[in-house]
């Protein structure tokens, strides 16, 4: 499992198993407005600026060329072959299991465990996008080594990079939650875990996810290795939401540095460059991720999705 596909295996996949009719509707319905890119050698997508007027033309290309990797733009253009006349772009969140700064496994690439931890994070982010931000037309795609969240809500499609970055910071829990408040001229402080609403609730969920998946050897900015070990030793308290006791055991002053450090970790759990890039090309759902021999595919039910059951091409099962 997770071995690279040979050219012969790619050819078999695209001629015997791949079906253009499985392309998600959100790709197929405006296929003529997207730029397509291809990697034929495994060295990156050097074949860019391709345009397909319909699925039949794309199908003929894929069966004839069986590319190492296939991509389509998140942007819609009037002239996609020249990337001119930008109309709008999907809002994207890229969670790659192999790049997670905190994960409980020690594999060198990806494994079942870190893929599942990436899925857990994606589920929380989708809840935030739909619940807190009220966004619709949200799709989850298994990329082969992680997940893409693709948002086509009309309210975000024309946003610029700066606003997209702010949405990312909120959704990822990448901002240190506010502690100081004022009411009737009086100032007071409250910890994030005392306010289980809005952004504070988002941060609680993301911080708990990080703490529960730490191995104990992580590096967190301005936090000592001893504190990291203390977090691992006491994190069972968080399963019962005993944040106050957790803070007391870590130490009140150290805890504030820990919160700031976790906000920084949360930002690295998602590839920010992908979110703010309005003209990004993204791995095409239904295509083969040849580095790991997995199918990139839209996930209809992320809560029960198991890539090792649903995204493994037939040729992997037939390997000796």
Image (cartoon, grey):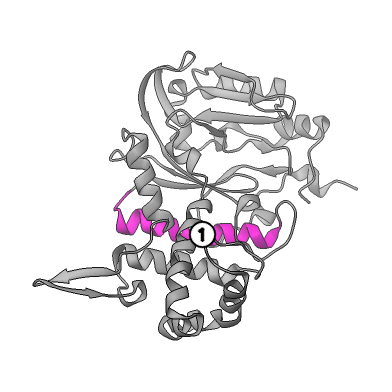
The count of marks equals 1
Residue shown at 41% from the left, 36% from the top: 90
Q: Is residue 203 above or below residue 19?
A: below
Determine if residue 202 is in view: yes
Horizontally, residue 233 falls left or right of residue 82, namely right
Query: Label 1 crowding class (10 Å Cα cut-off): few <14, some 14-19, many 20+?
Result: some
Q: Position of residue 140 (x, y in %)?
A: 49, 48
Residue corresponding to mark 1: 121
Q: Position of residue 14 (x, y in %)?
A: 70, 31
Look at the image and say whether residue 119 sits in the magenta stretch: yes
Residue shown at 79% from the left, 40% from the top: 4
Which residue is at the front of the view, 232 or 184?
184
Q: Position of residue 60 (x, y in %)?
A: 64, 20
Residue shown at 67% from the left, 63% from the top: 113
Read off the magenta span: 111-135
Which residue is at the front of the view, 137 or 102?
102
Q: Is residue 110 above or below residue 14?
A: below
Residue shown at 39% from the left, 59% from the top: 127
Look at the image and say whether residue 21 sits in the magenta stretch: no
Determine if residue 122 is in view: no
Mark 1 element type: helix
Q: Which quadrant holds residue 244? A: bottom left
Q: Position of residue 260 (x, y in %)?
A: 44, 63
Q: Which quadrant holds residue 286? A: top right
């Amino acid at each position: 499992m997770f071995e690279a596909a040979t050219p012969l295996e790619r050819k078999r996949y695209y001629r015997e198993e791949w079906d253009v009719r499985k392309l998600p509707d959100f790709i197929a319905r405006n296929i003529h407005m997207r730029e397509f890119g291809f990697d034929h050698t495994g060295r990156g997508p050097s074949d860019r600026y391709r345009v397909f007027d319909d699925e039949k033309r794309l199908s003929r290309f894929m069966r004839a060329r069986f590319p190492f990797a296939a991509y389509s733009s998140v942007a819609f253009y009037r002239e996609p072959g020249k990337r001119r006349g930008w109309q709008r772009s999907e809002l994207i969140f890229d969670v790659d299991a192999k790049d997670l700064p905190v994960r409980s496994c020690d594999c060198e690439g990806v494994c079942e465990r870190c893929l599942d931890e990436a899925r857990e994070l994606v589920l929380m982010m989708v809840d935030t996008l739909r619940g807190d931000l009220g966004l619709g037309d949200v799709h989850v795609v298994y990329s082969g080594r992680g997940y893409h969240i693709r948002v086509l809500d009309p309210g975000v499609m024309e946003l610029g990079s700066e606003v997209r970055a702010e949405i990312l910071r909120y959704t990822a829990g990448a901002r240190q939650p506010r502690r100081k408040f004022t009411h009737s001229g009086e100032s007071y402080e409250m910890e994030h875990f005392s306010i289980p609403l809005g952004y504070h609730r988002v941060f609680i969920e993301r911080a708990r996810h990080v703490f529960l998946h730490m191995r104990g050897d992580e590096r967190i900015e301005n936090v000592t290795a001893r504190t990291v070990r203390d977090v691992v030793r006491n994190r069972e308290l968080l399963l019962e939401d005993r944040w106050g006791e957790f803070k007391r055991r870590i130490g009140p002053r150290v805890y504030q540095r820990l919160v700031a450090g976790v906000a920084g970790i949360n930002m690295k759990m998602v590839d920010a460059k992908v979110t703010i890039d309005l003209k990004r090309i993204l791995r095409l759902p239904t295509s083969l991720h040849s580095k790991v021999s997995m199918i990139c595919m839209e996930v209809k039910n992320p809560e029960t999705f198991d890539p090792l059951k649903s995204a493994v091409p037939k040729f992997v099962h037939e390997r000796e």
